[in-house]
Every structure is written in C-alpha cells, then in structure tokens.
Amino acid sequence: MEGKSIIRVKDLKKNFGDLQVLKGISTEFEAKKVVSIIGPSGGGKSTFLRCLNLLEMPSSGHIYFNNVDICSKNVDINVQRQKIGMVFQHFNLFNNMNVIKNLTVAPVKIKGMTQDEAMEKALELLKRLGLDDKADSFPSQLSGGQKQRIAILRSLMMDPEVMLFDEPTSALDPEMIGEVLDVMKDLAESGMTMIIVTHEMRFAREVSDRVLFLDGGLIDEDRSASDFFNDPHSPRLISFLNKVL
Amino acid sequence: MNFFEQFAVILQEYYPYFLDGVKNTLIIAAMSVVLGVIFGTLMAIMRMCRIKPLKWIATAYIEFIRGTPLMVQLMFIFYGLPMVGIEFPDVSFIPNFSRFMAGIVAMSMNSCAYIAEVIRSGIQAVDEGQMEAARSIGFKYGESMKLVILPQAVKNILPALGNEFVTVIKESSIVSVIGISDLMYGAQGVIALTYRSLPCLAIAACIYFILTFISSRLIGLLEKRMRHGR
Ligand SMILES: Nc1ncnc2c1ncn2[C@@H]1O[C@H](COP(=O)(O)OP(=O)(O)OP(=O)(O)O)[C@@H](O)[C@H]1O
Ligand SMILES: [Mg+2]
C-alpha cells in the first residue's frame, strides 16, 4: 500500500453482551485520504467509527494510531483523542457555551493556547464559513446546518490529524445538507484525512478515495470509489446499491 | 366564641409560641437541606462511580431510606444511637441541643437519599452526546463533567432541590415527637394551654402553607431567571 497509513486496524471485534457487532475488521487508513463507509443500518458502521477513538472499547483486536496501539493500557487515550476529531450525527455542540466558547474551550484548556490566540483562530474559521455573526449565539439559536458546520470547526480548532464523521448530514433538513457537505469537500481538498460514515452516495463517490461496505460486522467490499460504485463485486453490496441508488 | 374568633384570639395571645416554632422549623429544614445536599452529592457520586462496592453501598442506603418511614428513622437516631453509645453532647447555650441534633441528623440522612436521586437524575438527563463530544475532543472525564455536564445538570437539579426544601419544611413537623420545639410542637403546646385543638391546628396549617407557598414562589422566580439568563 502506498502512502503512510495513519490508522491501522487489526482484527477488531466488538461485542455488546451476546451480540457481536464487529466480527474481525482489519484495514488501514492512509494520511490525506478520504475513506467513506457505507452499509445497511445496524451493520456496525457507527460502532466501528466509535472504536477508532475508543468511545467504544473494542472487545479484542488492535487499533494503531501513528503506530501507537491505543487499545494498550499504558497509552493515555485523552492525548490521542486530541488528534482525532469527531463529528456526530446530532452535532453535540456544548449546550452551555456560546459558539466562540465551544470553539475555544478545548484548545485553551487542553492545548494551553492563550485565550487571544484561540479567539483569533476561531473568528478566522468562522469568517471563512460566513458564520462570524454567530460567535455569541448559543447552540439552541442555530439551525442544524449551522450547528454541524460549527461542530466541524470545533474539531478543526484542535488541528486533528484525522477526522471521523458519523452520518454528519442525517439529522439535517434537506436544504441544509449541501452547506455541510461543501465544508467537508473543502476539508477533503485541503488534504485532511477523513473517515466518513454516510448515506450520501453521490457525495461518497465524489470525494472519497476509497469506499468500504460494512455489513454484518465485516468489511464486505473495499475498493476505490469508482470501482466500488461502477463494478461492485459482493452480491450484498450490489443489492444494497440497487436499493439506495 | 366561634371558630374564627378563637383563631384570632389564640393567634393574638400565643403568637410567640408559633413564631418560635417557625424559627426552629426553618432552621431544621435549612440545615437538613444543606447537609442533605453535601452528603447527597457524595452519595450520588458513589452511586454513579465505577467502584462496585461504593455503588452498592450508596444504592442500598438510598433504597433503604426511601423505603422506610421517616418516623422510624427519627426514632432510630434519637433512641437507637445513645443505646450503642453515640450521644450528641448537650451544649449549654443552645437549649435542647442534643434533641435538635438528633432531629437534624435524621432529617438530613433522609433528605440526602432523595437529593442523591435528584442529582443523579439531573446529571443523567443531560444528553449523552455532550459527554461523548467532550471526551472525543480530548477532555478527561472529570474535566468533561466540570465544563460541560454539571453546568447543564445544575439547571435540572436546582428546581428539584427547591421542591425538596418545601417537602422538608412539611415533613420536619415529625420532629416534634422527640420534643423539638418546632412549629408543630408549638401548636401542641398552645393546645395544652387552651384546650382548643382545632383553631391551633388551623393556625399551624396556615403557617406551614405560608412557608411552603413563599418558598415555592421564590424557587419559581429563581427558575425563571435561570431559564432566561443562561
Ligand atoms: N451501546 C450499545 N449497546 C448494545 N447494542 C448496541 C450498542 N450500540 C450499538 N448496538 C447494536 O450494534 C449494532 C450495530 O450498531 P451501529 O450503530 O454500529 O450500526 P450502524 O451501522 O451505525 O447503523 P445506522 O446506519 O442505523 O447508524 C446494532 O444492532 C445496534 O443495536
Ligand atoms: Mg450509525
């Protein structure tokens, strides 16, 4: 495999009680590449993504982030998570903080950035998205699309090495999906390493370098974006694509 | 004299008994809630923590207290503790200090269990996604609690704590059975002097109602202010 892989997953399994949700996943994610993960509901996409930053603790297997096994007991996951951004379906902006505080709290408290530096950086990012007039708003005063774009900025404030997206547009009204996808597209073009769980097939096809089909806790197909959609091999992927396209 | 005349006359002549009772009732209620909040917070933390034995102890305590009558708990503290050698000292400048202490200890031990549940449910009512977002960005568990979860939980907890204060004002009337001169005890004293039980009880009821009514109004105001100012 060409390029430097930033995340390597080895035989990852995850059980919830008796239910085995991930049944042994091995794959790699290269720096500066965009990988989309699609698959039927309940297939384990969210669980897989949440394992990558240990929001879910894997039952067995290994996850190497920059060659560090983050599942190992003597790794401080809090430090690793600073370099792994995550964007949620339901935004999860901090409801008790206004926009600017949402953006600056982590860089100031965790990375020791000064308040002024953080503020400047936040305002610059907000301006770039035309959201600088929302700096003092609270999450409850924002539209879904605004919330999600700010959630993306919140992750970016930490200068992550990789960004995880779990269905970032699924909770949005249709007219707001575009503005979020545009931000993600820009991010992809800027060279961010991204892993995206999505139901937006056209978007996945357009921005991804690679697409994974995750079904029944296993990666059933793993191809370049164009092959994935034009020449799918797995019968289950073929029937899945027939249903959604 | 009809009922209302009796009511007025008794109030006029014996109001110091009632006033003294109100003072003690408020002291007991306030102390119980303050101590209840302190220990209730500890109990809530124990109940939510990952160390199993602590969790079990807290759960057992909370369930037990909530499942037994306050009267029994009060008797246990007042009569039971001295039997096993734990006695509250008498302090010369505060009359009846040991009784008073027993009352406050029993009331706060009781209140603490309810408050622990108020705090726990207030924290659990905060959307799980808030904690996940905080953790995923790199905050430790404690930092996430302090910066994100607790400020939101407080908004759920404070109004419920206010209600607990109102409940404690009413429930505290029970301490009169161990001879603490609270409002109920004062009313009984006046009954003994006047042999007019109905007007005396009516006066006590009115005063309790005024106390709880004012308290809940104040809490309502506080709640409103919190909802507007964030
Ligand atoms: N915390 C949990 N406890 C128990 N079971 C869970 C938990 N989280 C997920 N599961 C189960 O694991 C399976 C996979 O869930 P997951 O959320 O990963 O699917 P998904 O592919 O993201 O689906 P969707 O497209 O609906 O988001 C489901 O059967 C789900 O019920
Ligand atoms: Mg999901």
Image (spheres, helix red, strand yellow):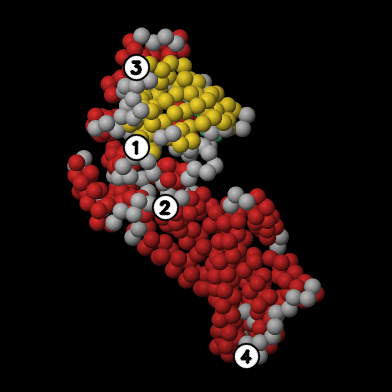
Which numbered marker is on residue B46?
Answer: none
Q: On the same chain: label 3 and label 1?
A: yes
Task: Please state the horizontal and vertical placement of residue B51, each as a whole percent of the image.
Answer: 63, 51
In front of the other: label 2 or label 3?
3
Q: Residue at x 54, y 33 (%)?
A: A58
Q: Name the residue under label 1.
A: A161
Compare marks 4 and 2 and give the one earlier in the sequence.
4
Q: Mark 4 points at which residue?
A: B93
Tag 3 near tag 1, CB within 8 Å:
no
Q: Relative to residue B226, is residue B8 depicted above or below?
A: below
Q: On the same chain: label 4 and label 1?
A: no
Q: Can residue A151 be seen in this view?
A: no
Q: Name the residue under label 3.
A: A224
| Chain letter, disc 3 residue | A
Q: On the same chain: label 3 and label 4?
A: no
The kind of secondary structure element at disc 1 is loop
The three-letter amino acid code for the residue at tag 2 is: Val
Compare marks 3 and 1 and give the one earlier in the sequence.
1
In front of the other: label 4 or label 1?
1
Task: Please state the horizontal and vertical placement of residue B196, each as a whole percent of the image.
Answer: 67, 82
The three-letter amino acid code for the residue at tag 1 is: Glu
Q: Mark 2 points at which residue?
A: B148
